[in-house]
Amino acid sequence: WDITEIDKLPPTIRDSYMALYNTTNDIGYWTMREIVINTIPYMQKVWADECKVYIKEVHWYNKGIKLTLKEYMDNAVDSIEGLIMLLGSYFLTTDKLMEEGLDY
């Protein structure tokens, strides 16, 4: 979650990363201001997990690995970004955000 070396990235990846970084930090800033809980570490973890799933899919593609439907669906559940959208929506819409719930 460090942007100090962002200039070393290709422009398309740099732009995408900055959009991700800014949006996540905006949500985190809003929740810290309104609810007094820092949600940025939770969002960072979800994004890191999402990127690991993408890397797995790229590996399969580059190696020409053909998956069974079950193998594909097990990974697809994580790669559709549902958790990211739910987590961001939860932070922006709840009035009773508690760290115990976030840790769960």
Image (cartoon, rainbow, N blue to C red):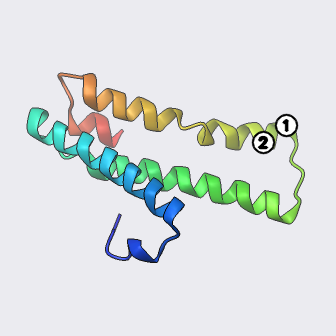
What is the C-alpha distance between the residues marked 2 and 1? 5 Å
Residue under pointer 2: 72
Q: Quadrant of residue 77?
A: top right
Q: Nearer the viewer, residue 15 or 75?
A: 15
Residue under pointer 1: 69
Count of numbered circles on the image: 2
31 left or right of 8 in image? left
- Type of the residue with mark 2: Tyr
Label pair 2/1, CB-CB below 8 angstroms: yes
Write the residue at 17% across / 22% down. Answer: 95
75 left or right of 39 in image? right
70 left or right of 49 in image? right
Image spot of residue 59 (x, y percent): 75, 63
Write the residue at 32% across / 46% down. Answer: 24
- Type of the residue with mark 1: Leu
Identify the secondary structure beneath mark 1.
Answer: helix
* Mark 1 Cα-neighbour bin, 10 Å: few <14, some 14–19, many ≥20: few
Identify the secondary structure beneath mark 2.
Answer: helix
Which quarter of the rendering shows the N terminus?
bottom left
* Mark 2 Cα-neighbour bin, 10 Å: few <14, some 14–19, many ≥20: few
